[in-house]
């Protein structure tokens, strides 16, 4: 399949997922367009898949809809029934994210030893367009960013940034559960057992103590033992 066809299909899929999340969050196209700082007609084109959302735009919409970011490009993630958090102005954050993505895109391309011409061929666009993406002069649609990451042997995690943009409550919950799932089974079971709450609190308090204070506690315990 040609790169342009793959990108077009991905744009349509992402548009459908964004529309689904928007409707469930009770948001109108006009509200979303205003939130992103684009014309309502432009937002309609995004949802129709005629134009590709960028990663900063999807991150912003995830915050507005209170859904995990991945829920706007992967339909395996559930979408909440309603939005509870108030939206935040994200114009400056989106500009910063676009610049950061531009730098990372250039870095991964260079690390993969690819020229702008080769990257343009992979994305079915001109080297000039690649230069525009890498300068942050134009937004790169997520579908093209996915393809660029794959061509460079990278994953989308390379382009995510936990600190650059506020996370929605749903995204925060997802990441907490993901970190919990990465723990060894016995440690995870210990943490999830309500009867161990006291031990966990003691461990939290101990972690905040200085080395000298911990040493004194240990010496006191040894005196009591012996």
Image (cartoon, grey):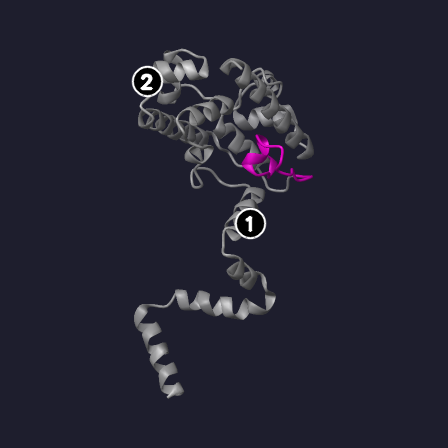
Q: Which residues are magenta?
A: 65-82
Q: Residue at x 55, y 14 (%)?
A: 5
| Numbered circle sitting on residue 115 | 2
Secondary element type, mark 1: helix
Q: Is residue 5 visible?
A: yes
Q: Residue at x 30, y 72 (%)?
A: 212
**Label 2 packing within 10 angstroms: few (<14), some (14-19), many (20+):** some
The answer to whether 110 appears left or right of 95 in the picture is left
| Residue at the spot of label 1 | 177
**Labels 2 and 1: the sequence-earlier one:** 2
* Residue 30 falls in image quadrant: top right
Task: Name the magenta segment's main secondary structure.
Answer: loop
Give yes or no for residue 39 being in the magenta stretch. no
* Residue 15 falls in image quadrant: top right
* Residue 81 falls in image quadrant: top right
Q: Is residue 113 above or below residue 63?
A: above
The answer to whether 77 appears left or right of 205 in the picture is right
């Amino acid at each position: 399949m040609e790169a342009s066809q793959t990108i077009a299909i991905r744009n349509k899929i992402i548009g459908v997922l964004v529309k689904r999340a928007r409707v469930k969050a009770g948001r109108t196209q006009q509200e979303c367009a205003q939130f992103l700082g684009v014309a309502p007609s432009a937002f309609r084109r995004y949802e129709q898949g005629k134009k590709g959302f960028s990663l900063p735009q999807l991150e912003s919409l995830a915050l507005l809809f209170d859904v995990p970011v991945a829920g706007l490009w992967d339909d395996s993630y559930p979408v909440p029934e309603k939005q509870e958090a108030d939206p935040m102005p994200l114009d400056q954050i989106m500009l910063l994210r676009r610049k950061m993505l531009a730098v990372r895109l250039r870095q991964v391309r260079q690390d993969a030893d690819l020229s702008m011409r080769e990257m343009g061929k992979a994305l079915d666009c001109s080297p000039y367009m690649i230069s525009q993406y890498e300068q942050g002069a134009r937004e790169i649609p997520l579908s093209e960013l996915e393809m660029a990451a794959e061509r460079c042997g990278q994953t989308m995690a390379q382009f995510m940034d936990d600190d650059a943009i506020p996370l929605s409550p749903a995204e925060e919950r997802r990441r907490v559960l993901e970190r919990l799932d990465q723990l060894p089974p016995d440690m995870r079971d210990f943490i999830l057992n309500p009867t161990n709450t006291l031990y966990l609190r003691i461990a939290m308090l101990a972690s905040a103590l200085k080395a000298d204070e911990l040493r004194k506690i240990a010496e006191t315990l040894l005196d009591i033992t012996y």
